[in-house]
Image (tube, rainbow, N blue to C red):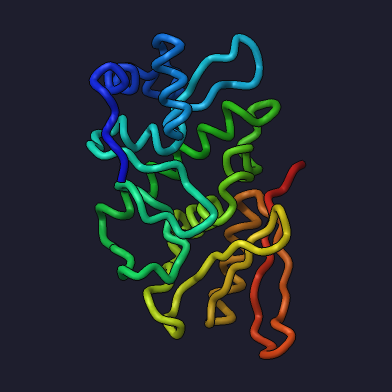
Amino acid sequence: MTRPPTAAQRRVIDTADPVTGRLRGTETQLAALVKRGLAFRHPRPPHDHFLTPEGHRVRQGVLETPQPATEAPASAGVFAARVGGEETAPESGPARRREVHSAWQGLLELRRMTNPGGAMDRPCGWERTHLAEAAALALEAAGHRPAGPGPGASGYRVRTTPQPEAVAVHEPDGEVLRACATTLEGAGWQVSDHREPRTGTRYLLASPRRA
């Protein structure tokens, strides 16, 4: 868990455009928000700054600031994508569904603002640097359930792989695994079916689609 935004940073976040997440503030304030993973600088002129999905969560009233996501299961902050197998059993219910929906909508907006031509049907740069969290968010937003703690728990598990732009998705139920593949393909991922050499257990290999 990190420090909450300063009062000045919070004012910048609170006054962001409610639709696009476009920010106005000093260069120092904007750079600090980028460093904390709450904003990003648009690569094309005029290089405006916009809220990231985490920034949208903070803007909606969260008082604690999530850390920028890493390759490992995210455990810091108020909202974190559930990659499955976390030590604490995944929360469920209306509050969690609202959080996931909000994060997914923020991610779609991030795609629109950063992908060439505003394409929302394929992952953006943020997702390519947060593969496990991005794939897990797509799955949970579609209603799939992440695995609870313990090796035998049912539900999906998203794990990084040695391949630079691919994650593995494990789900003990073959029918649900196929449904996960359909979800990821619909969210702009390329998905292929594989089996573990020793056990023959099926899993998915998913990579963000580029075009």
| Front residue (pair 14, 1) | 1
Q: Looking at the rendering, in which quadrant would you find the C terminus?
A: top right
Rendered location of residue 172, percent (x, y):
53, 82
| Front residue (pair 141, 65) | 65
Rendered location of residue 47, percent (x, y):
59, 14
100 left or right of 112? Answer: left
Q: How many labels does the image show?
A: 0
Can the viewer see residue 99 in this picture?
Answer: no
Rendered location of residue 110, percent (x, y):
53, 33
| Front residue (pair 160, 195) | 160
Residue at x 45% of width, y 85% of height? 152
Q: In which quarter of the image is residue 125?
A: top right
Rendered location of residue 117, percent (x, y):
69, 26
Can the viewer see residue 194 in this picture?
Answer: yes
| Front residue (pair 178, 27) | 27
Q: Quadrant of residue 196?
A: bottom right
